[in-house]
Image (tube, helix red, strand yellow):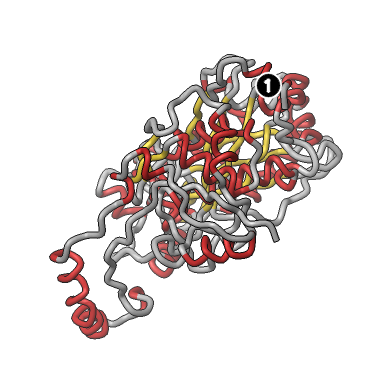
Amino acid sequence: METVREVAKFEGVPDMPMAVYPGAIQGHTASELRANVEKIFPDIINGITQPAPVSQASQTQAAREQSVFEGDLAAVNAYFILNKWSDGHPIIPPTMDKVREFLRFTDRAPHEVVATLPIAYAQATPWNIAVNGVMAGCLPQYMPVLIAAAEALGDPKFDITGFGSTGGYMPFLVINGPIARQLDIRSELPCISHPPNAVIGRAIGLMLRNIAGFIPGDTAMGTFGYGLPFVFAEDEAMCREIGWPPFHARHGFADDANVLTLCGSGNWGHQSTPTGSDAQMLAAYGVREVARRVIAERSVYRRAASGMFAMVITPPVSKVLAQGGFKPASLAQYWFDHATITCAEYNFRSRYGQSATPAPTIQSLLDKGALDPALFGNKGPDDTVPMFQTPDTIHVFVSGDRGRNKYTSLWGPYFTPTLKAIALPAEWEEKLAAI
């Protein structure tokens, strides 16, 4: 087998000291809690008092561009898995030549800081972004999307620390603008499974691992693990046909701008099938989708940490809704108004479905000033309250199979959709034509 001679080095993440609490703290008695803390207390002291490992982020440019390994394809993959740089799927070895080919598609210097990414607080640069893109199987021309994704991941408004949660949350990207067509990032079938969509999503996951430091089982503690991040384009042609501005245009960008939206979700699963030509009934069906997906006691309680609910609507359903007079904002308001939960149910779920002690109730959150009295105040046990604190939590995208009637809903309690312009390099059109 051919030897891979130069596998590019990239700024790594230092091994941070950890003290690991044994078991599930939420189910332990006070005496068990005390005993377990005493067991790990020496690890806590050592982690605080012993010198921390030196981060590779302080290396010189020459050191960053050194080869880390030489071997055949199987050996490279084994080495990357051993160092926890791989997600377990076979990688494309990031040779120097491949990385430099990616760098042709950005005007930024190879080691310019694009973003600083928690939880490792390591610097994302075009160099290490390209390394992860190569590993994922991306093409060089995807580089502008990957850089915009890194900028979004580093935006404090988004707050990527939620990706370390036991909930197993994952990022997803929505692409708007001409670049989606130029790079063949699909909105229609097969959507997230289409190769450009899939490998860009995988690259985001590798960036979270190798730059941000979210290593499943070490620093990313999703109880059941993680699905691969995914990517889809919005169906802008359908948006314009039905009179809905595309998502990026509703958020202040020019209609023809290239824009990436970073989102987060704890699910990708069953899609409901709203059927019929009655727009009011289809909107009402969407209420059930909100109620099915959202964990209200976390959505309301987590208001200070933000949150998002995305409804992705296929073109046939969006067309019926538009013909019935609905627009994205009025749909969000309708679902906010009608997706509700009784106070008694909220308090029960909060008591037995949260780790906070004492578990918050509607009344305790009102007493703290964390809820709007106009929406949540003066309620009895059987009275209903919204599943969100504001309709601004609800976001609408048009995408998916043009021949199917579907809603798919995506919810995460920690994230705020974050939009970033996708910067194209000089002579973009010429570089694409030369491929």
Where is residue 305? Give x, y as percent.
Answer: 36, 45
- The x, y position of residue 377, in whole percent, is 36, 45
* Location of mark 1 (residue): 178
Residue 396: quarter of image: top right
Q: Quadrant of the C terminus?
A: top right
Q: Position of residue 31 (x, y in %)?
A: 22, 85
Residue at the far right in the pictured view? 403
Query: Is any part of residue 410 visible from this angle?
Result: no
Q: Is residue 316 toward the left or the right of residue 1 in the image?
A: right
Nearer-the-camera pick, 432 or 206: 432
Residue at disc 1, secondary structure:
helix
Frontmost residue, 79 versus 384: 79
The answer to whether any part of residue 199 appears in the image is: yes
What residue is at 27 percent from the left and 65 percent from the top?
17
Q: Which quadrant of the rendered structure holds the N terminus?
A: bottom right
Q: Quadrant of residue 72?
A: bottom right
Mark 1, Cα crowd under 10 Å, few <14 / some 14-19 / many 20+, is some
Q: Position of residue 224 (x, y in %)?
A: 53, 68
- The residue that appears at 42% across and 57% down in the rendered structure is 164
Q: Is residue 381 above or below residue 230?
A: below
Q: Determine the residue positioned at 54% across, 54% down.
A: 266
Image point (46%, 42%), residue name: 128
Q: Amino acid at mark 1?
A: Pro
